[in-house]
Image (spheres, grey):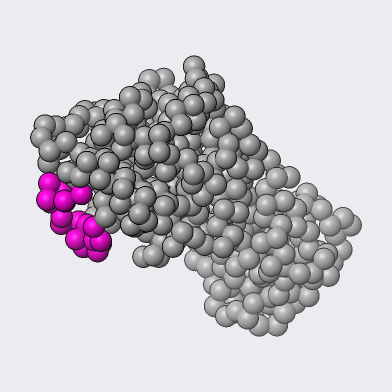
């Protein structure tokens, strides 16, 4: 059966040209690991930096790995991270469809074209996965079948795969924007399967076809694919297509020896969110895992997405593996929490405060204001503020503090005086409570701390609190403050 060349011409004619086009091509696994998120980010940044187009393509040809709802995770993550795509399954585009399983007819046609060009062949041998890895390609009997012989067997209904025909001799060189020129001996490359027995393409084949047909100019992916790149080059060559710019990203590691892996308990993007990290902080940190700003901004650490899009360049990418450091991410998270407007912070912190503080009269925004400078992760909040809801059971020893010059006796005197003063205070405001307590300390001829310490301990029932005595009393309100101060007094 002759090939329908018109089909290929039409496909060629559809390819957008003359602009930077990048694609994020995840397989729907059900979660977004940190390395994948970084690939998505870099891919998006390269497109945005060049004013180009960012495409989402779903690579679901490995039917065995399909997970229900997994594409939703991809959409949700990209949307949350504001890595908006210009073309993709949900928004369409000039080279649709953008889901590989919906493009399955295409791959067979191109594989057939490659057979015709002598760069691929039908193979009727049955090989186990192990044999596939150890088989010497030159010994495959199907390799030397004439096309007519092979075609006759195909037409007779014999099951087959289509394999790439790698030259026996010589070397193949490819260029990577990060790793430079890499040359390999062709004899080390296997005649990889392009089309499987079930008619579906392998990842390695579908990828090349789609990248070409979608007009992708920069292929950004994990460095685990680096060893396949020579075979991709030979495919491009076989078709007579231009090879895109490869941008392989060094791996994200858990430690010096191990890649991060969900299976080994390393957090995915969703896990990090659940652990209380902000999307913007995650993105900022992840951007710097494998890329560093240069020139005037070499020292800059905090980058908005927009700033990253402006600054990102391939030259700043690193070949060395990056180690994911949760402490460093925590540091970024704290910076982002502090930089929020008080309103935004209160909104983000609100649900976490309300997890611990249920009394409606205790104001979320007032408690949030105490926390903003003292919080590294939103998930730290409930534990820090639960004393507002309920006075913890505490030890009277807390009233003794050397630095503040307090002991049980002093604390007793301080609480008695503070209670009488606070009972009479005309207004329950920050200033009124503050000025009242300071004036009282002066009258009693003690350091402010000597008075504030026992008041804060009695009000909070714990030594470490966000905010000082004045703020805590104000938020608790007069009745609750006096009730707690009297309870403290009774302990002394
Ligand atoms: N589907 C592949 C993955 O999820 C994509 C690799 C590529 O971008 O070429 O790892």
Q: Residue 389 vs residue 176: left or right?
A: right
Q: Residue 254 vs residue 415: left or right?
A: left
Name the residue at the top extreme: 18
* The quadrant where residue 210 appears: top left
Q: Residue 75 vs residue 179: left or right?
A: right
User: How far from the left and from the top, in percent, is residue 23?
Assistant: 48, 35
Q: Which of these two is toward me, 118 or 268?
A: 118
Observer able to see residue 374: no
What residue is at 48 percent from the left and 52 percent from the top? Answer: 60
* The quadrant where residue 273 appears: bottom right
Q: Residue 457 vs residue 272: left or right?
A: right
Magenta region, main secondary structure: helix
What residue is at 60 percent from the left and 67 percent from the top? Answer: 383
Q: Which of these two is toward me, 357 or 115?
A: 115
User: How far from the left and from the top, in percent, is residue 12?
Assistant: 48, 25
Picture layout, residue 348 above or below residue 10 = below
Q: Give yes or no for residue 289 being in the magenta stretch.
A: no
Quadrant housing the C terminus: bottom right
Picture layout, residue 484 above or below residue 75 = below
User: How far from the left and from the top, in percent, is residue 246?
Assistant: 34, 31
Name the residue at the right extreme: 426
Q: Which of these two is toward me, 125 or 64?
A: 125
Q: Give yes or no for residue 140 being in the magenta stretch.
A: yes
Observer able to see residue 198: yes
**First to last magenta residue range:** 125-142
* The quadrant where residue 134 appears: bottom left
What residue is at 52 percent from the left and 62 percent from the top? Answer: 67
User: How far from the left and from the top, in percent, is residue 106?
Assistant: 47, 40
Quadrant housing the N terminus: top left
């Amino acid at each position: 059966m002759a090939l329908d060349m018109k089909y290929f011409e039409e496909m060629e004619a559809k390819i957008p040209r003359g602009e930077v086009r990048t694609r994020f091509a995840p397989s729907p696994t059900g979660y977004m690991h940190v390395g994948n998120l970084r690939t998505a980010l870099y891919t998006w940044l390269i497109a945005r930096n060049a004013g180009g187009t960012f495409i989402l393509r779903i690579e679901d040809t490995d039917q065995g790995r399909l997970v229900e709802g997994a594409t939703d995770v991809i959409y949700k993550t990209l949307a949350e991270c504001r890595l908006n795509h210009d073309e993709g399954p949900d928004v369409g585009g000039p080279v649709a469809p953008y889901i590989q399983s919906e493009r399955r007819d295409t791959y067979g046609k191109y594989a057939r074209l490659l057979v015709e060009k002598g760069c691929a062949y039908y193979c009727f041998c049955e090989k186990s996965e192990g044999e596939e890895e150890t088989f010497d390609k030159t010994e495959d009997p199907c390799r030397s079948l004439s096309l007519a012989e092979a075609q006759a067997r195909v037409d007779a209904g014999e099951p087959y795969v289509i394999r790439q025909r790698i030259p026996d001799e010589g070397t193949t060189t490819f260029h990577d924007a990060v790793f430079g020129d890499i040359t390999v001996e062709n004899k080390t490359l296997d005649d990889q399967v392009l089309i499987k027995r079930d008619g579906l393409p392998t990842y390695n084949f579908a990828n090349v076809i789609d990248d070409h047909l979608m007009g992708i100019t920069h292929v950004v992916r994990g460095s685990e694919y680096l060893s396949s790149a020579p075979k991709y080059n030979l495919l491009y060559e076989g078709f007579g297509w231009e090879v895109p710019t490869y941008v392989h990203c060094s791996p994200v590691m858990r430690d010096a020896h191990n890649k991060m892996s969900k299976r080994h308990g390393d957090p995915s993007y969703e896990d990090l969110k659940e652990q209380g990290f902000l999307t913007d902080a995650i993105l900022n940190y992840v951007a710097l895992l494998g890329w560093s700003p240069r020139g005037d901004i070499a020292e800059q650490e905090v980058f908005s997405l927009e700033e990253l899009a402006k600054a990102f360049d391939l030259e700043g990418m690193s070949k060395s593996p990056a180690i994911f450091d949760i402490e460093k991410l925590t540091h970024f998270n704290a910076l982002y929490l502090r930089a929020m407007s008080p309103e935004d912070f209160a909104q983000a912190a609100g649900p976490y405060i309300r997890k611990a503080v249920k009394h409606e009269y205790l104001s979320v925004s007032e408690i949030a204001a105490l926390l903003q400078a003292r919080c590294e992760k939103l998930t730290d909040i409930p534990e820090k503020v639960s004393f507002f809801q309920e006075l913890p059971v505490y030890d009277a020893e807390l009233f003794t503090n050397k630095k503040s010059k307090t002991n049980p006796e002093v604390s007793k005197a301080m609480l008695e005086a503070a209670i009488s003063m606070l009972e009479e205070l005309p207004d329950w405001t920050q200033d009124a409570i503050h000025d009242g307590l300071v004036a009282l300390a002066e009258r009693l001829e003690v350091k402010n701390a000597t008075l504030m310490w026992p008041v804060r301990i009695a009000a909070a029932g714990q030594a470490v609190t966000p905010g000082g005595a004045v703020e805590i009393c104000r938020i608790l309100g007069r009745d609750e403050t006096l009730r707690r101060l009297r309870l403290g007094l009774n302990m002394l």
